[in-house]
Image (spheres, grey):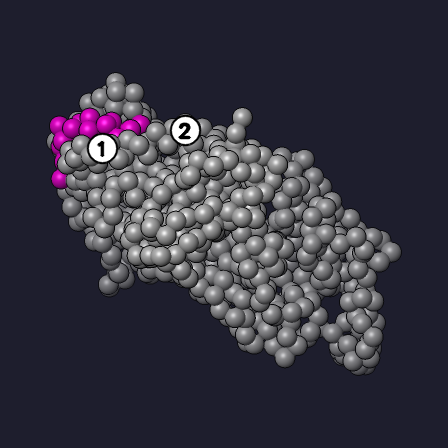
Amino acid sequence: MITFNQKTKVFTLDNGSITYSFLLNEEGFLETLYYGPHLNEELSKESLRGGDIDNCSTEYFDTDSNKEKTFPDHFKSTTASLEIATHGYLDKRGAPIIIQNPTGSYQTSFIFSSYQIFDGIKELKDLPGIRTKKKDCETLEITLQEQEAPVKLVYSLTIFTGFDVISKSFQIINEGEESLHLLRAFSLELDLLSSSYTLNHFDGVWANERNWNRNPVVQGEQRISSNYGRSSHEENPFVFLSSTDASMTTGEVIGFNLIYSGNFTFRTFSDYSKSLRILYGLNDEDFDYQLAPRQKFETPIALMFYSSCGVDGLSVVCQQFIKKHIINQQIDHNYKPIIFNSWEGCLFDFNTDKIISYIKDSEKIGSELFVLDDGWFGRRNDDYDGLGDWHVNSSKIDLHRVIDYCHQEKLKFGIWFEPEMVNPNSDLFKKHPEYVLGYNHKAMTISRHQLVLDFSNPEVVDCIYQQMVLFLDEYPVDYIKWDHNRSIGEHYSSYYPFSQQGEIYHRLVLGYYSLLSRLTKRYPQILFEGCASGGARFDLGTLYYCPQIWASDESDPLQRISIQYNTSLGYPLSTIGSHVNNNPLTSYKTKAMIAFFGTYGYEMNPNNLKTSEVEELSEIKELYHQYHQSVVEDGVVYHLMNPNISDFVALESVSSNQESALLLLMNKLKDHDHYYSLKLLGLKDEYQYQNDLDNQVHSGQYYRLVGLRFSRSWFNEFNCRIIKIIKKK
């Protein structure tokens, strides 16, 4: 899959479906040759340089000979397509790595030293990575040396069997005797010869996450980023470039994601040459990492996904790769019970008897896992107290009795935590005020009456870990909802000296991973669900530990369906936390159908459900038991009608064996006197399938080319339907 031609000096990564190649030129720089569909012919230096060699060179002054010289390879540093650009020289398009060496110079330029190729991928020390076996991928590791400073750079590229995916990352190693300042540590550079793309990204705000935005790539710089201390509501790390002629099913699309949960930047730059430079990785705002002698810095892994079959082609690659290589399969492949969460039903107002009554009535609608949300710990009866004091409020609830009742009824039990936050009224803060970010500042920002714990300090992480272990060793919990209800304001740590304050944003994320890693290893049977005030930390770093994430706090089903649709472009349906609640806009059945195309669960006061509502939810419960695991969790979703640009939404999820499919169809406005024919994807042409819309039997080819026909009278406002398409035996 990976080769190096000693004669032509060309590295090639190829899995039979995609090809990525670059040249080691005579100056020791790596020049990108090609990225795209599988290419039989190896590219060469001549195909890169073209015919106008005299105008494609950079001159330099050689201090050894005191003469002006031209690179012998006619290497034009200001326009070349590079794997690792320089900084502080004439190339002003941006570089992935910037180092300030002990002399104060910002010049950063890495020259090839050696390479190795091996099966598999190396694990990162403190960061989540890719779950894989040696047979699944091959890695090219290139070692480069900085020209002016004793710094070694290890550049890792991995290509995967069966997936049009390439991963990239860097290790920066200080081999000198003095500390250096790492001012930028991106994970990826990709130079493309054309800038004729549309930049697709997903912005938003609390309860309105992941709005699909399309911006033409223009000359100059464009940035998609987060500086909120988490991946954020405001922008998601999943972005993609689509060729200007691409559609949902045709054209070139290149996707990017980062296995990271903190600040990030995706940057494009195009100049007079109309080529495009892409840089992606840790946000370099307020980033200044002091690299001590012999110290190594690892960047998060960045992923590149390729599709020549449009946006849905890219989406399928993303979904399947994440399920196989990011998510903990031991947890994810188990049957996931239907969740009932207590929060929207009672908020903080509950006692033991009330919770047991919730459990009893939740069973009527098929609940299999009862989750006690916020309010069970410390003096927690409102937002003002309790965070940081992770012991049961026994005067409020008898948690042993609640858990015993759940298990007696054959239900699993789950609990809510917000480990990274603290209330000023809590015992923890009164005892250790230095445990918070911004300690000793005259005014510390507060949100939801809470401060942020300094997870860059290992002592703080250990304090929370010990509290959680004491609780989890006593109470047999099957599920944890992990919340993070505010963004980071001041990113100052009293634990570190002045010279290391530029490291805090990143160290906070490492502290988060440290706690999650220790807990998931100690309690492998517990299902962790990520949450951050809804969907503010919906990213691959969290998915590495938590196979599902609460997608949004928005409960309006019309808003929710767009959030789920857009999220599923880059992430599997099995990761999208979604519940049925008591929002009055639509029927419970419609809300249940929307939640079905996610993890599925409930969040309301079950004591107030009417008999007719229980019947509606019971109908979807039966569908869940029949098809959810095979079709929704393990299957692939296709995006047939886009609610961002039409009054309809259509999602089709197809089982991995292509024998079953479920079609979710919903309209947002009244639409009378029209006929619709909806063409399906993902079915086998030669199979015969029966649908339960009109009970007709057709081939997979028929559904692909002709589609399902809908009558004029069906589309009333907010009408929703799940249609089954099942292979005939």
According to the picture, the residue beneath numbered tag 1 turns out to be: 614
Mark 2 residue type = Gln
Residue projecting furthest to the top: 408
Q: Which residue is disc 2 drawn over?
A: 626
Which picture quadrant has residue 210? bottom left
Q: Find residue 462 and report its horizontal and vertical position in percent.
A: 37, 39
**Quadrant position of the C terminus in the picture:** top right
Does residue 369 belong to the magenta stretch? Answer: yes
Does 359 appear above or below 247? above
User: Which one is in front, 425 or 408?
Assistant: 408
**Is residue 495 shown in magenta?**
no
Give the structural element (helix, strand or loop) at label 2. Answer: helix
Is disc 1 placed on a helix, strand or loop? helix
Q: Position of 685 compared to 380: left or right?
A: right
Q: Percent from the top left, x then y, of residue 148?
A: 68, 66
Q: Is residue 286 left or right of residue 134?
A: left
User: Does the image show residue 306?
Assistant: yes
Which quarter of the figure is the N terminus placed in? top right
Read off the magenta span: 349-373
**Rendered location of residue 83, percent (x, y):** 67, 61
